[in-house]
Amino acid sequence: MNSTPMRRLRLTWGGATDQGRIRANNQDAMYADSGLFVVADGMGGHQGGEVAANLAVRTLTNAERSDREQLREAVAEANRVVHQTALEEAELHGMGTTLTTLAVSQEANTHQFVILNVGDSRVYRHRDGQLEQLTEDHSYVAELVRRGELDDDAAQAHPYRNMLTRAIGVHAEVEIDEWLLEPVSGDRFMLCSDGLTNELADLEIAEQLRFDKDPSTTAKALVGLANERGGRDNSTVLIVDVQVEVIDPDEPPLSSGTSESQGRISSSPDEANTPIGDSENFSNQLEQKSNTKKRSWLSDRVHVKLGAVIISLVLLFSSAAMVTAIGLYARSSYHVGIVANHVVIQKGRIGGLLWFEPTLEHWTDIQTVQLAEQDRQRLANGEQMLDLDNAKTFVANLRSRLVKGVDGS
Ligand code: MN
């Protein structure tokens, strides 16, 4: 037997988002899957902020993103898409969003974390009881603090504390901050929007992260605290716990640890010995242990390379099977609804499910004022569709019975 040690990266994550106690809607967006964690905080009148945040997240999740170059290009693409949409739609002019991302990336033959950031949403790392903000805020007051012209307390109270110096979608090009990190066991990452950090001091956040409760419970507690302190903005928290295990490939596979029923998907030593380039074979073997959906996600995200070390990547959610199932259900259909006074096709269930909010699939130029009264009422609550074709047909029919011209006259 080949006894080269294997390193396995195991991630457990959970998140929470809330519109807070003042804002009329939630313009934050959040996304978590096998190796990509994103928080976006949209801004812009009407529902521009919501559109910008969702467009950015959707562009990112649809992109190729297995290494640093691709991830960076995906963020640049998100910027172009939001910018272009803002130019094309009068009501969305000036919309933008923050975008902060923690992703697993294939670098040489190891897996690393890549952090990409634009705006003032943040990534923190909690390690050995210490909380460290890894990203830099692209805000006017943060620039002043960095230049030593303002202290932290003055920054918290500054009237321009929400003014960003960089955001996704505002200009045709955007500068993206980037960090590359080695996965370390016990690290706990937190992605959040400023709705959390404007209400809670870092010390209070650290205290919650230190309790060692599961990510989902901790995220909910933090969002709850932000609301208790005033909830003046939407707040979003996404927590990712890191475990790195070195395993002996000569051991019989997986006699210990999480049981199959909890959604464990893993590679046995034999699978890890699959030659480079034979990922098809690798994923076929995995299929025996998991359903098709999980296999597709694994074959997307898992890479096995033979080198000095054999490394395999296993990403887990606590009760992953259940959550994956809910996520697939939540995203598996389409509905037609209204965003920023326009008819849109959204992917996902009406109202979202857990934090799997619907994402914008297709924007139309049909405005609410052009709709017949009956259609307007139907769409106010969203109209569930079987699939995308169905939704497109529905929109085409809608178009045929518009009561007013495109200019709304
Ligand atoms: Mn905010």
Image (cartoon, rainbow, N blue to C red):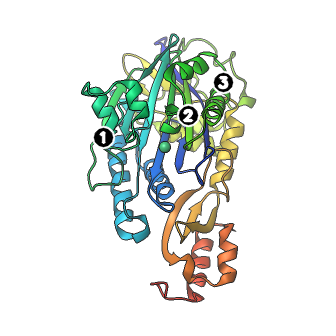
Q: Secondary structure at mark 1?
A: loop
**Could you tell me how far apart the alpha carbons at marks 1 and 2 are, in whole angstroms?**
21 Å
Q: Which residue is mark 1?
A: 176
Q: Residue at x 52, y 38 (%)?
A: 195
Chain-order first, disc 3 or disc 1? 1
Q: Which residue is mark 3?
A: 214
Image coordinates of residue 244 in percent, x first then y, are: 51, 17
Q: Mark 3–mark 2 contact, CB under 8 Å? A: no
Q: Amino acid at mark 2?
A: Leu
Q: Amino acid at mark 3?
A: Asp
Q: Amino acid at mark 1?
A: Ile
Callout 1 environment at 10 Å: few (<14), some (14 to 19), or many (20+)? some
- Asked if residue 64 is positioned above or below residue 403 in the image, the reply reads above
Name the quadrant containing residue 259.
Answer: top right
Q: Residue at x 66, y 79 (%)?
A: 375
Chain-order first, disc 3 or disc 2? 3
Name the quadrant containing residue 65.
Answer: top left
Chain-order first, disc 1 or disc 2? 1
**Could you tell me how far apart the alpha carbons at marks 3 and 2 are, in whole angstroms?**
12 Å
- Asked if residue 346 is positioned above or below residue 402 in the image, the reply reads above
**Could you tell me how far apart the alpha carbons at marks 3 and 1 are, in whole angstroms?**
31 Å
Q: Residue at x 37, y 47 (%)?
A: 74
